[in-house]
Each structure stands twice: as structure tokens, then as C-alpha cells.
Image (cartoon, helix red, strand yellow):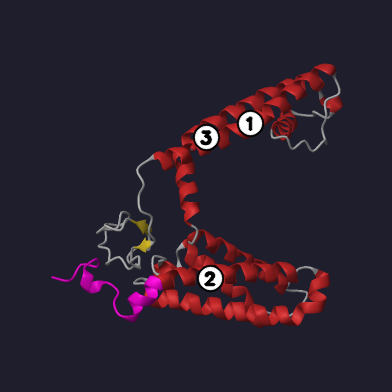
Amino acid sequence: MSALPDEPAAALHGWRLRVYTVIFEADTRAGRWFDHALIALILLSVAVVTADSVPAINARLHQPFQVAEWLFTAAFTIEYLARLATVRHPLRYATSFFGVIDLLALLPTYLALLLPEVHALIDVRVLRLLRVFRIFKLSAYVVEYRSLGHALRASRRKITVFITGVLMIVLVMGTLMYVVEGPENGFTSIPTAVYWAITTMTTVGFGDITPRTELGRFISSVMMLLGWGTLAVPTGIVTAEMASQRLAPMRTPTTRTCHECLTEGHLPEAVYCFHCGAQLPAWQHDTPA
């Protein structure tokens, strides 16, 4: 009988396990240092791309920016290859969300060498905008993102009901304004009036459409006051959900990652992955002094 894919014999071992623990997990000192260094590189690379788009700065620092960009690209290339070399299923990681983001962070610099600087073709500078995708990798290393995500998922039904109620209000109020103001005052159709109701209720107020009649201004005032409540309700829903999570029994957060499906966040005592059911390797972590 062939060995199951989640048996310990099929798990990572040796240098691959050590490098995997450093790259994909952060419960060891080396893993934390790697994450901090990677976040710093991501932020610096985004800052360089942003500054390079300013003509005055680009005119004076174009060459240093070019050198820095190649250094960043080399660092991210090594990181990407290390991830592919240490995971059990390289193709699965390469086609995952963060695997695609890693690849998008590298391609523009290399493609710039192949595409000629010809006006008939797409400007190579457009490809450089894809480097901003690196910043999305930050969400893989910030624990608070996961907590906020849990709160949003837990309150999604309440938020859906709230948004549905808001849509009903703007539809009714927009239709009412269409009847009150009419096309002569800019409310040429119900969709246009609903657009005005949305911009008014969200306190954006572009001012391209304004009521002219006294009744229309009264309705507009009511919509503005409703806008304050519109901003407060979803914030209160999510905040209450986050507070309830803090009052719940505390679970020890870790960055234990399943070698099979790359799902992280397992408890220290977990034996099997909560996502795919594969057997987890021993938890690699630093013991407190």
C-alpha cells in the first residue's frame, strides 16, 4: 500500500523544513526576522516606485532608482524561488493568490528587458505599475488582518441587511426627488436622482446636482442627517463583533502552516489541518527564556 500524502514520511525534512519554517511561519526568531525584513523591502520598493513616478525626483534620481529596483527584484526573485523550492506542491503555490502576487512583483522588471522602447507598443512604464501589487503581500504577515476578516465575516449578514435598507432608502428618496424637482432642476431620470441620493447620504455631495425647491431642500437636509447614521451603523456592527471576539475564550495565535494546502493559523496542539485534514508537522517555535 502506498504511503498517504499526509504521513510524516512524506512531510518536509532537513533543510527544506528549516527554510520552510523561516519563510512561511513566524513562531521562531528567524521567521520573525524574515517577516520584518520582507515587510521593510516591500514598503521600500513601493516607496521607490511611487517616488520614481514624480518627474522632478525621477530627473535627479533615475539611475539610483533603477539600481534599487534591480536589487529589490533580485531579492524578491530569490524569495520566490525559495518558496517554490520548499513547498511540497510548487505548482499549487504558484497558482495560489499570493503565488500569483509574488510573480506579478517580478515580471515587470524582466519584461522591460524584452519589450522595445517603441511608441507603437505599450509603454513599459505601464508595466511598472504592477509592482505595486507587492503591497498586497503585507496581508500575509499581519495578524490583525485576520482578526478584522473574522469580524467582517461574522457580521456579513447584518451588514447585508443594512446595505439593503440603505438601497431601499436611496431608491425611495431618489424617486421622490425626481417627482419633486423634475428634469428642469437636473433630476432628469430616476437613476440620476438615485445617484444624487447616494452622494448626499454618504456625505460626499459632489454638488453637480442640487435641489431648487423648498421641499427638495428639506428632503436633502433629511438625507444629509441620515448620512451621519449611515456612517455610524456599519462601524458599530463590526466594532461590536470585534469586541465579542475579544471577550471570547482566548486562542493562542500561531503561524503554523499546513505543508499540504499552506493554510496557516493552527493551534499549537493541533494534529491535523483544519482546512484539508492533512497531518501537521511538529510545531517549530522558540521556547520562552
- Residue in front for this viewpoint, 202 or 57: 57
User: Which residue is depicted at the point 67% across and 67% down?
Assistant: 129
Magenta stretch: give its range. Answer: 1-22
User: In the structure shown, which secondary structural element does the residue marked by tag 3 occupy?
Assistant: helix
Q: Residues within 10 Å of mark 3 (few under 14, many from 20)?
A: some
> Are the residues tagged 3 and 1 within 8 Å (C-beta)?
no
Q: Say which label, 3 or 1, has the lower sequence index.
A: 1
Q: Where is residue 12 in the image (x, y as percent from the top left)?
A: 30, 74
* Secondary structure category for the residue under label 2: helix
Label 2 amino acid?
Leu
Type of residue at label 3?
Ile
Disc 2: CA contacts within 10 A as few (<14), some (14-19) or many (>=20): some
Report the side of 49 relative to 209 (left or right). left
Give how far apart the Cα atoms at labels 3 and 1 are.
12 Å
Q: Tell me the residue at 69%/71% (across/down).
A: 48
The quadrant the C terminus occupies is bottom left
- 118 left or right, relative to 85: right
Residue 237: image tag = 3
Vertical side of 244 occupied by 277: above or below: below
The answer to whether residue 212 is seen in the rendering is: yes
> Mark 1 — residue?
230
For residue 246: magenta?
no
Could you tell me which residue is drawn at 75 percent across and 32 percent down? 196
Question: Looking at the picture, how far across and down is residue 150, in whole percent?
Answer: 45, 46
Q: Can residue 116 be seen in this view?
A: no
- Which residue bears the numbered disc 2? 38
User: Mark 1 falls on what kind of element?
Assistant: helix
